[in-house]
Image (cartoon, helix red, strand yellow):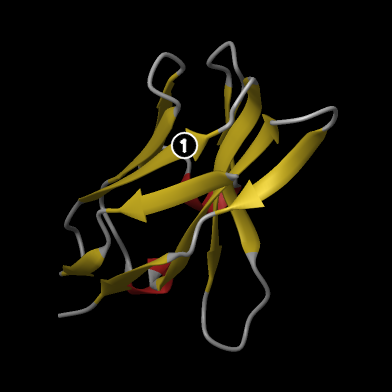
Amino acid sequence: QVQLVESGGGLVQPGGSLRLSCAASGSILSINTMGWYRQAPGKPRDLVATITTGGIPNYVASVKGRFTISRDNAKNTVSLQMNSLKPEDTAVYYCNAIILSGVFYREYWGQGTQVTVSS
């Protein structure tokens, strides 16, 4: 069994910062791309950022320059540093990873962590 467990969400004022972390555990042979998605109420789940095994990041335009994704391959973790937060960043944030646990790579999701940006 493979699990992704997120931490670090919460309530922050506009302009503030939060750091999300996600740890993968279980029968893991290899992890390919890791990333973060978010889902606001009444909206679909959207990509925020991804990072390859080699550390190459990719960001959605709305968070470029404000968010930084990073990973620790030795610890099977991925983090998202969020700065200059805006009310429109309010959403449930989900960790995502493509993981080899058996014969094939599969996509796994965390349970989600709430981020609320409000004064």
- Element on which disc 1 rests: strand
Above or below residue 55? Residue 21 is below
Residue occupying the point 77% across, 40% down: 106
The answer to which of 87 and 47 lies nearer the viewer is: 47
Location of the N terminus (image quadrant): top right
Residue occupying the point 32% across, 65% down: 86
Determine whether, in the image, residue 58 is placed left or right of residue 25: right
Above or below residue 104? Residue 8 is below
Q: Residue furthest bottom?
A: 42
Residue 22 in the image: state x and y as whole percent. 39, 43
Above or below residue 37? Residue 28 is above
Residue 14 in the image: state x and y as whole percent. 21, 67
According to the image, label 1 marks what residue?
A: 25
Residue 31 in the image: state x and y as whole percent. 62, 25
Residue occupying the point 37% across, 52% down: 6
Q: Residue furthest right?
A: 104
The answer to which of 65 and 113 lies nearer the viewer is: 113
Location of the C terminus (image quadrant): bottom left
Q: Residues within 10 Å of mark 1 (few under 14, many from 20)?
A: some
**How many labels, in total?**
1
Determine whether, in the image, residue 92 is placed left or right of residue 32: left
For the residue marked with disc 1, what is the amino acid? Ser
Residue occupying the point 29% across, 59% down: 85
Residue 10 figure quarter: bottom left
